[in-house]
Amino acid sequence: MNIKKSPFILLLALAILSSCGSKTDKKLAEAAAESPKEKFEPNWESIKKNYKDPEWFNQQKFGIFIHWGAYSVPAFGSEWYPRQMYMDTATFTAQLNPEHKGPNATYTHHKKTWGDQKTFGYKDFIPMFKGENFNATEWIDLFKKSGAKYVIPVADHHDGFAMYNAKTTRWNSVNMGPKRDVLGELFKEGRAQGLIMGASSHYAFNWSFYNKKDKFDTTDPEYADLYSAKGKDLKEPVSEEFKQKWWDRTVDLIDNYQPDILWFDFYLDIPDYADMRPKIAAYYYNKGIEWGKEVVINDKNFDHEAFPEGTVIYDLERGKLPGIRKLPWQTDTSIGKNSWSYVTNWQSKTSNQLIDDLVDIVSKNGNLLLNVGPKADGTIPEDQQKILLEIGDWLAINGEAIYDTKYWKVFGEGPTEVKKGHHSEGQNEDFTGQDIRFTQKDNKVYAIMMAWPENNEVLIKSLNPATDKVSSVRMLGSDTNLKWNQSENGLKVTMPATKPCENAFVLELII
């Protein structure tokens, strides 16, 4: 007899333990009485049947992404430097920008600064990537102060260099470069400080990341394990050997670091990887059962249904949704307007823009994953630190309107519309004092004004007394007794004389 699955035995055990009066034993028995989770099979029918987005992910709301690697050494262009340094004018025009005139700036910069791509290739940046000032405790301390609840370092980017003690490649941060297990150190410190730790894998695109021409070192067989074994044919499909390499590398990351979140970049969505997607999802989710915790995949290829709806958390790169999505979702974006990795001409967004993004996203049932780009030496630039601390200061006052909240019946009101889709953030206008977003928790609704209203007065039209009668109004961070009145036109509130913070402003409403 299978005791775990026998209702009679379980009920008898519970009755005996109940008569003993031990609270601890009762809890253990109740936990044992829960039906064991069914194993995931490597097909979408099984995964859809057994997967449920974990509640903890939707409660956290704010996380940190980290793009740090050997591409931080040249600090030019973006984290795609290792791709574009091998793209001469003809290749760059054909693959990336048919309307481009003149030489590719990254290709030209590399030849001028570092030398010919045959004699000084991307591999030669790796010994220069020392991370001598990297301190996991300092990073995690900063992320905690920012108010982030989870952290997702890039485990391996398209460049093929693993930022952890990879068992499947010599090109890793323990063997080379910093000669430290960067991911391992961050996981250890992050978990010690109560943060949820995830890892991102961008490795699927390594197959086609590097341009292959005889005038580059990318065709040298000695470095095929970094630059991939793909030949010069751009249309060459992903080989079975590389797919197995991707699988082994991903399983190594899962098994040895037990990430709570596994974030996948694009290219895993192409048909070549169709058989690998349900296989890796089932493997990872079964590992979660084995570890006794709910784990989640983040994937940004929802539009392609690479991972069908209801099997992963949908992620939007540098974009948002115009309305509520009842299933949890996430925006990943960078503090940097022009790059994810550190570059010398890095341009930071303002904390006001990012706080407004966080509020807008949360009101629509989403999370914000915000990227930082450390320098090659392992320090996080001061302007990025300042922005993170300003977000943390805002959350210290207004966090109850963000964490553990749910979306309300409408996400908000106001004139400013948000564009939908990947890479749409540059099309969005700044929010105004008439733009309001809503979240809720228990009997409280939070009305979040994206800017201080003109004439120190706001009318919230969505709050009609016939459907949402308000009994109390206060502003988070302020002790002022507010003047307010609710009519069929909405809720009119007079602002306090002093602003409680510098950015979005939260009214707590008891309904």
Image: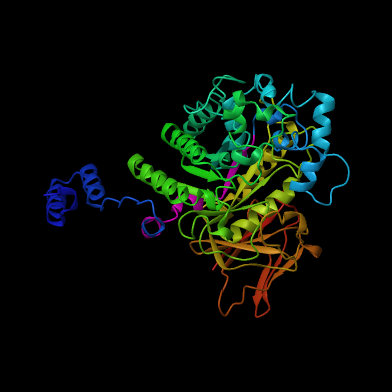
Pick whichever, 484 or 386, lies toward us: 386
Residue 6, quarter of the rendered image: bottom left
Stretch in magenta: 47-67
Pick whichever, 508 or 3, lies toward us: 3
Q: Is residue 458 magenta?
A: no
Residue 379, quarter of the rendered image: top right
Determine whether 178 is above or below 88 in the image.
Answer: above
Residue 80 coordinates in the image, percent (x, y): 70, 38
Pick whichever, 189 or 213, lies toward us: 213
**Residue 377 shows in the view:** no
Q: Residue at x 57, y 59 (%)?
A: 304
Residue 225 coordinates in the image, percent (x, y): 57, 29
Residue 270 coordinates in the image, percent (x, y): 56, 51
Residue 383 coordinates in the image, percent (x, y): 75, 35
Q: Is residue 101 left or right of residue 154?
A: right
Q: Quadrant of the C terminus?
A: bottom right
Residue 233, quarter of the rendered image: top right
Protein image colouring: rainbow
**Residue 188 shows in the view:** yes
Q: Is residue 354 left or right of residue 155?
A: right
Q: Residue at x 50, y 25 (%)?
A: 165
Determine whether 287 is above or below 192 in the image.
Answer: below
Q: Residue at x 84, y 33 (%)?
A: 108
Question: How many numbered marks have been drawn onto this rendered protein structure?
Answer: 0
Q: Is residue 506 left or right of residue 58?
A: right
